[in-house]
Structures are given as structure tokens and as C-alpha cells.
Amino acid sequence: MQNMQAAPLDRGKILADSIHSWWRDAGVAYLCGDEATNWLAMPAAQPERVEPPVRRPSANPSAPVAAPPVRTDWPADFEGMQAAIGGDATLPGNGYSPGRAAPQGMASAALMVLVDFPEEEDLRAESFGNGPVGRLLQAMLAACGYAPQELYLGALAHSRPASGALPGADMALLADFARYQIKVAQPARLLCLGSAVSEAVLGQELMQARANLPDFNQDGGILTAVATFHPRTLLARPVLKAQAWKDLQRIVRKDRA
């Protein structure tokens, strides 16, 4: 069999051709030049090229802007709390929308009413009890024998989430702030409208709270509390109005209704 092994000279030529091809592919035109080159000399200074800033998109272009830190040093007096809720975006539940509905009513009210958040009409009026939902609420309270000046109207959140629902991650803090509002306002009775308020304030889902008729423990004192359907729900499902009226019997003022 013929020996196909290349001679040493052939290997050297092959290696030289390989190196030459590598430099040629890398863009080097000549392996040697007519003039000597001082490879140790420092290269001439080149004018610095300023690259224009590159704008890179964020990981999630639709991510919302971070909200300001939530305030936890809540006002201790009734007037201060009212003013802060109406004007301080850092209070719990105040940063979901640019507009807010301020709580309204008096301290030591005969009845404190809590909803989850204001309606669109409430935001425009900057107070509760507006639009179809507000008008139904006012009719319910009047039927129970309460005059407007005897009421306190508030909410878990005094701004309105764009999603139409309170974020689950915020519920613990919103519940704490709602209970704090009750402590400062010192009402005689409490009306919780809707499942979100029932769970946050009474610690029970709405249907369970309606069946169990729980009272609210306020600094060792017992506060009569009622949970029933939100007027928003009653407008969507009028058939539930009879059940709501049955729930409200615990807080009806028998001398007026």
C-alpha cells in the first residue's frame, strides 16, 4: 500500500497556508510591508468618539409607575383623619385613581356605612351617595329611619381601582385602616356593604356574615354590625332587595322607619 503520510516539508507548507488564510479572512491585506514597524510604540491618540445614548426599553413597558410609600402614621383625631383622607394620596386606598371621594358625616354618628370604593359619580362629586348606586343607598338608609346628618359614609378605599376590584395584596392594610376609621369615628352602629367590606372588617364572607349576624368588637365594646349586599349588586339583581331589607332590620330605627 502506498504511504500517504505527508513529508515534513508538506506539513510546513500546509501550516503556512492555513495561517495565511486565517489572516486574509480576518481582513489583513499584507503580511509584510516595505517599512519597518515599531510594535512597542504607543498608538497615536485618536479623537474620542462619543456614542449617542442608547434608549433601551424596560423589561415591561406596560408596568405601572411605582406608587409613593403608603403612610402609616394615621391622624388620631376625627377632623384630622377626615382632612387627610380627602387630600393625602399616601393613605391606604387613596392612590388607585387621581380623584377621590372624601368621607362625609359626623363623629359618633348613629350609623357608619362602609363601601368598598367610590363610584364614578362619587369621584366627580368628590363625595359619596351620587349616581344610581348612591341614590339607592340613600333610599335604603332613609327607609331605615336615618337622616343624612346622622350618618357617616366611608370606604375601604376612597379612590377607585381601574380594574373595578381592590387588589388582594392590599386588603390587609385596607382592613386595618377601615378598623382605625371606625375607632376614630366611634359610631353607634355599623353597616358593611358588599363582600369585600364584610371580609375586611368582620372577618367573614358576606353570606356567612349575613347568617351569623356578627357584632364588631371596638376597644372592648360591642358594636352592632350588619352586612348586606352592595347597592351596586342590588341594581344588577333587584330580586335580592327583599333579602337586603331583611338584613337591615337589625339597624332599623323602629321609632322612625
Image (spheres, rainbow, N blue to C red):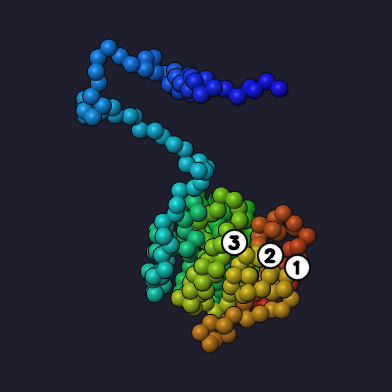
Residue 194 position, x and y percent, is 65, 64
**Would residue 167 be found to the left or right of residue 13 on screen?**
right
Q: Which of marks 3 and 1 is nearer the N terminus?
A: 3
Q: Is residue 184 visible?
A: yes
Instruction: Farthest residue to the bottom: give it.
Output: 220
Residue 247 position, x and y percent, is 71, 72
Local crowd size for mark 1, using a 10 Å CA cut-off: few (<14), some (14–19), many (≥20): some
Q: Earlier in the sequence, mark 1 or mark 2?
A: 2
Local crowd size for mark 2, using a 10 Å CA cut-off: few (<14), some (14–19), many (≥20): many
Q: Of helix, strand and loop, which one carries label 3?
A: helix
Local crowd size for mark 3, using a 10 Å CA cut-off: few (<14), some (14–19), many (≥20): few
Q: Quadrant of the N terminus?
A: top right
* Disc marking residue 243: 1
Seen in the picture, residue 96 relative to 248 is either above or below; the reply is: above
* Disc marking residue 229: 2
* Disc marking residue 168: 3
Q: In which quarter of the image is the C terminus?
A: bottom right
Residue at the spot 41% in from the left edge and 72% down from the top edge? 78
Residue at the spot 69% in from the left edge and 74% down from the top edge? 209
Residue at the spot 26% in from the left edge and 26% down from the top edge? 39
Seen in the picture, residue 187 relative to 70 is either above or below; the reply is: below
Query: Between tags 3 and 1, which lies in front?
Result: 3
Q: Can residue 248 be seen in this view?
A: no
Q: Mark 3: which amino acid?
A: Gly
Q: Mark 1: which amino acid?
A: Gln
Q: Which of marks 3 and 2 is nearer the N terminus?
A: 3
* Quarter of image, res 196: bottom right
* Disc marking residue 161: none
